[in-house]
Image (cartoon, grey):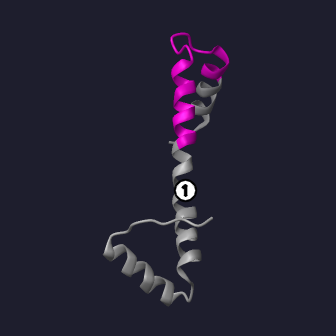
Amino acid sequence: MKTAISLPDEVFFAAERQAERVKKSRNPLYAEALTEYLAQHVTDEVTEAMDRVVDRIDQSRPDPFLTGSARRLFEHAEW
């Protein structure tokens, strides 16, 4: 897909220097940079979704199985 974007001059020229250094054209360089950015930030979406689920769980009544499991883990943990 073809698109047009605006970049600050310093970002554009730094990208040009990097593309030259790694012997790539702008297209693969920008695509790789955006792919890395998205990979790092997709985890934010997962975390937010998990937070929403946890918020809906009734935490006023502890689960006896989880409480017992946690107790056994702590009893055997090396401190």
Residue 32 lies in what quarter of the image? bottom right
**Residue range corresponding to the magenta coloring:** 45-68
Give residue 44's position: percent from left, percent from top. 51, 44
Residue farthest along the top direction in this orientation = 61
Give residue 23's position: percent from left, percent from top. 56, 89
Give residue 60's position: percent from left, percent from top. 51, 11
Label 1 neighbour load within 10 Å: few <14, some 14-19, many 20+: few
Residue 8 lies in what quarter of the image? bottom left
Mark 1 = which residue? 38
Regarding mark 1 in the picture, which secondary structure is present there? helix
- At x 52%, y 79%, the residue is 26
In this rendering, the count of numbered labels is 1
- At x 53%, y 39%, the residue is 47
The verdict on residue 55 being magenta is yes
Residue farthest along the right direction in this orientation = 65
The amino acid on which the numbered mark 1 sits, given as a three-letter code, is Leu
Image quadrant holding the N terminus, namely bottom right
In the image, residue 72 above or below residue 8? above
- At x 59%, y 25%, the residue is 71
Give residue 34's position: percent from left, percent from top. 53, 63
